[in-house]
Amino acid sequence: MKRPSRIDSRAIEESLSVDSAARLLATGGQLVDVRPPADFDRDALPGALNLPVAALTWKFHCLNRYRPVILCSDNGSYCHHAARLLAGEGFSRIYHLAVN
């Protein structure tokens, strides 16, 4: 499978409100926490799947590329990097929800 040579900036939504995230989750969205396992174990959001950024390069197949993906982390650079990786694998509905 050929990877896109450039990432479509429309594939990455910089931020998503809690209400919007809840609506997406109710209609099939996937909540993915990209923090390291220790952080995830400490305070994960209910229903979140832990796929740390370092693991996404070989575990992205655990996600459905045709359903929205909501990335969450308390580190914006983790979400940005994860979004770029997923966009490079053909995911187009990628959102970011900050966890504080």
Image (cartoon, rainbow, N blue to C red):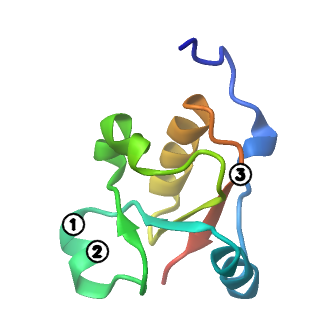
Residue occupying the point 47% across, 51% down:
63
Label 2 to label 1: alpha-carbon separation: 5 Å
Alpha-carbon span between mark 2 and mark 3 = 23 Å
**Nearer the camera: disc 3 or disc 1:** 3
* Residue in view at x 45 percent, y 54 percent: 78
Would residue 38 be found to the left or right of residue 44 on screen? Answer: left
Q: Are marks 2 and 1 in contact (CB under 8 Å)?
A: yes
* Residue drawn at the location 63% of the way across and 76% of the way down: 25
**Which amino acid does the dot numbered 1 rest on?**
Pro
Comes first in the chain, label 3 or label 1: 1
SS category of the residue bearing label 2: helix
* Residue wearing tag 3: 93
Q: Secondary structure at mark 3?
A: loop
Q: Residues within 10 Å of mark 2 (few under 14, many from 20)?
A: some
Name the amino acid type tagged 3. Answer: Arg
Q: Earlier in the sequence, mark 2 or mark 3?
A: 2
Q: Secondary structure at mark 1?
A: helix
Tell me the crowding category of disc 1: few under 14, some 14 to 19, or many 20 or more residues within 10 angstroms, Cα based: few
**Residue 72 image point, x, y percent:** 50, 68
> For the view shown, which residue lies furthest in the left direction?
38
